[in-house]
Amino acid sequence: MMSLHFPLPTIFYFAFSCLLLINVKEASSGKILLQEKSSDQSQIILNVHIVPHTHDDVGWLKTVDQYYYGLNNTIQHASVQSILDSTVRALLENSERKFTYVEMAFFTKWWEEQTPAMKDRVKELVKNRQLSFANGGWCMHDEATTFYIGMIDQTTRGHDFLKTAFDGYTPRVGWQLDPFGHSATQASLLSAEVGFDAIYFGRIDHQDLLIRQIKSECEGVWRSSPNLGSDAQVFFGLTGGFRGNYGPPGGFDLDGYSSDEPFVDGINIDQRVSEFVDNIIWQANISRGRNIMLTMGSDFQYENAFENFKRLDSLIHFVNQYQQQGKIFPEKLGRFSGLNVFYSNPEIYTEAKLSDETVWNLKEDDFFPYSDCNDCFWTGYFTSRPNLKRFERVSSSFLQAARQLEAYYSMVQGSHVYVDSKSPLESLESAISVVQHHDGVSGTSKQHVAYDYAFRVDSGMKSASKYAGSILKNILRSSPFTELIYCQDLNVSKCEVIQNATLNMGTDVYVVAYNALVQSREEIMSVPVSRDASFEVQSVQDDTTMQSVLLPSPNYTNTKDAAPFMLHFDTGLIPPLGAAVFRIRMTSLRRSALKPESKIHDTSRSYMVSNDKIQADFKSGMLQQLCLEHRSVCVKIKQIWGYYTSFNSSSTENSQNSGAYIFRPFEADQELKTFPSGSSKTASYVSELVCEIHTTFSNWVTQIIRIKKNAPYLEMQYIVGPIPDQDGIGKEIVTRYSSENLQNNGVFYTDSNGREFMKRQKGKRISWDLLEHQPVAGNYYPVNAAIYIHDDVSSLTVLNDRSQGGSSLKNGTIELMVHRRTKHDDARGVGEPIDETDGGMSAYPPYGEAKRRGRGIIVQGIHRVMVGSARDGAANARSQMDGNFSPLHLFFATALCASSKSSNEAVFEKASFSMLQENNLPPNVMLVTFAKLNGPLNDAVTTPTTTTVLVRIGHQYASGEGRTEDDLLSSPASVDLSVLFPSHQIVRMVEKTLSNNQERSTWEKKRFHWNASSGYKSGLFDRNSTKCSSGLGNTITICPMKICTFEVEVVATAGNDFQSDVL
């Protein structure tokens, strides 16, 4: 997405250029010939790398398919199929030409259409470095609203294709040109750890950009992880001529659809060469070294690649010719003695920057938030399209569980467990990869594209859940007549199979709860039922009656056919990487649903609700204080709801609107417009298992505070919408948690894509001086999993269930934006406001008027609120983050009631299972990935009992995040991988890069080592301290925040006791 960009003022560039030494000399024919330093130190050749590329959004203004096939061009003219067709032919025509491609979601579609002969010719282009791949993921993922697991998955998917199609090809460079800010996780995990030597991007804050231009720091070394240190550092560079984007220099867009003039002999050569040299010398004089890169391309360019390359050929030819003929005056060249202009690619450029032997400035924080003018903070998209954000997170979590089941059952069966060559998980894997795109889960696409993303994910979920249910059915040996069904609408109290079974007595409901974590867990589960009756929940394993309670379920979301009651029950311990089966039976028609507690509504009285972990004080249904058990730590908390009014203006001055990308309150320092607490209505339900306090603040904001047995957190469920818009004013909805006794002094911490926490400070940037213009919007940051504050006494942590914008704008507060509805476009290219409705839209012009239909959407979500001592903020978040991402996955079946125990066995012969040979893995590790690979390791000969599995084990704590100084949770963890393979023996185990496209040892031997200055926080780290060290046998040791990736080949050592139904 090339948005409308607000450049730095022209007058600045003129004044700034006058401060610089403007210089260059010598040239070649256009072939790659990196000119080294002359023995005469005054002779320095400037190497100008011409990098042709296209930026092809995997959905934005048009859907993925529309972009590929060139459909719906009334919205945007773009055809990726034509781009790839013509570019490949243009490369074959001239061996000096080069091209860089990025998005494998498109390239794989094109590849599948090619003949074997054409594939061979393309392979030669890749081998000769004419065609190169940067990033190489399925898409160019977002960096603010993505979770690290989705980022890894989409990158791995693309890298796997490249490795297979091009004989082991491994991308060496990250290419994040368009995302709207850049995360620390991108630099460490998704660059260095996937085998990149460098990462290039276009967008950083306009103030930061100006400072970097002045200080010649538009390139450097990015060491973003204090835990992984220099082992995960990467070279970074800005694109777009260091002007804040990713296109060619101004006036030199040589695409066939551009109005910029080409180089025409005898007409404009003198002028065009002079203008071009001025551009590159400006860039060269704010660069370090003797190499610069020109990104010659932009959105969906090279559709007629012959024209593009013809114009580029002329540019290179005439600039080099003028250089050779001495027509470029020395005074233009300054510190350079000559020019060398040639076709290149990001990998070649990175090699050249390494050869510059420069000491680079060190960057140790991230590039959030991004703004491209004083009032233009791209912080609204942190929250935009909240339902799509949640759907992506839920589906990604389910995919990890389904992969585990597939891998486990494949080992048991010894081969594929499906008929077709592709796994039934393929469509979900593809959909999840596509939606990671920086206009996908970010919420910044047009409405019909957002629907397409959701449709893809929904289709994938239907296929994957049916497949996963079939595997569980076989593992648990359920009746041939039993079908395990996964209900996607449990969050809105809908599940047809349960609701039908609970209309009357006589039908049992069986619940299979699958735990994808490597630690056993106990949860309070909730399932929708149709009537107020008496229910009994039993563990099928031992016929134990589980504690349960029935509560009313008001239909706050106005969902059609939602169940009126929720049955909550205690699961007991669910085994790790395993499942347990429960039976729900209606025992009588006697009503059992709890009634509201009348004494709680006495506004003159305070009351306390507690379990064995926390105590919460309320008054008039409003939270007053949250304490740990025995009140060892107490934090006074008041929670409020409110909104900022969106800046909406049609004037020509100061007209930056709030929209899909940008959050801008109507007043820069606007106070939150809160709902008066006295107007709220409250109903409370109290039991030993779960307590609920329902509070309605208005007819479009309701919340349920829930305290569950054994839970160390307070759960706050919110239902927001439809946001009223009758006044024509947009609204950005926020909940704020405030504590009068917690003094954080503007310092707060947000997670980076679910990994390391980043320190934030209101009104400041860690690595550069901010001139503040938007004190609200400019202090919002992406919160993917958790945000916390602390002082010397206590801490307050809030975990969320999807990416949201968050901040701490006042002392002792945390606020999160949960929903937004704007009425104007923010002029960043999408061309419509973020105004989602439940009835969709009419057709786009010229076929319709793109009018919204229906009411505004309703958003439902959950925050988990925790308190602790001064150093517990991160530890509390860590303790819940994995479970929050990966809840118990529930499948349902029904059977006619029978009185004997054998009736349960007739439905399920096995009532539980675990994939682990031991009870639990260490509490500070997560099984990030456990997935069957299609082929054997290193082309080894496979047998029916041999299986190859991709295993990623992540350390989930950072150094120093334990509750005490010597807490083992933040110490290295040891894991014996053999426990993941019951009844199997590991015959080979190889450590891989994070995207599994090469052996880690191979990468270590060829990786580039950059010379970086000491940072503002630290110097060099011990590289050996962060490696996935091997102990005895199959045991590995993982340092804090490390994710270790292994390709493991196993062979069965015991017989298979499962039936072998084809799935």
Image: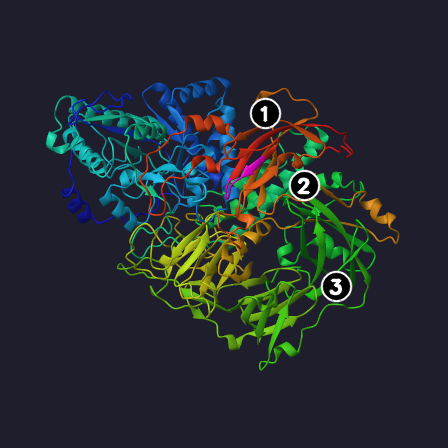
Colour mapping used in the image: rainbow
SS for tag 1? Answer: helix
- In the rendered image, the quadrant that contains the N terminus is top left
**Could you tell which of marks 1 and 3 lies nearer the N-terminus?**
3
The answer to which of marks 3 and 2 sits earlier in the sequence is 2
Q: For the residues labelled 3 and 2, say whether their Cβ atoms are less than 8 Å apart.
A: no
Q: Earlier in the sequence, mark 2 or mark 1?
A: 2
> In the rendered picture of this protein, how many numbered marks are placed on residues?
3
Q: Is residue 1041 magenta?
A: yes
For image coordinates 44% across by 55% down, the residue present is 749
In the depicted structure, whether residue 120 falls above or below residue 981: above
Dot 3 amino acid type: Arg
Mark 2 residue type:
Ala
- What residue range appears in magenta? 1036-1042
Q: Provide residue 1024's location: percent of width, then percent of height.
A: 46, 35
**Residue at the far bottom in the pictured view:** 604
Q: Is 233 drawn above or below residue 658 in the view shown?
A: above
Q: Decide which of 1045, 421 is in the foreground and name it.
A: 1045
Q: What label does residue 531 carry, if any?
A: 3
Measured in 3D between alpha carbons, the distance from the residue under mark 2 to the one under mark 1, in whole angstroms, is 25 Å
Q: Secondary structure at mark 2?
A: helix
Which one is in front, 383 or 497? Answer: 383
How much space separates mark 3 and mark 2, taking CA atoms?
Answer: 30 Å
Point out which mark residue 468 bears: 2
Q: Position of residue 972 (x, y in %)?
A: 54, 42
Q: Residue at image x 34%, y 19%? A: 95
Residue 660 showing in the rendered view: no
Q: Which mark is residue 499?
A: none
Res. 870 visible in picture: yes
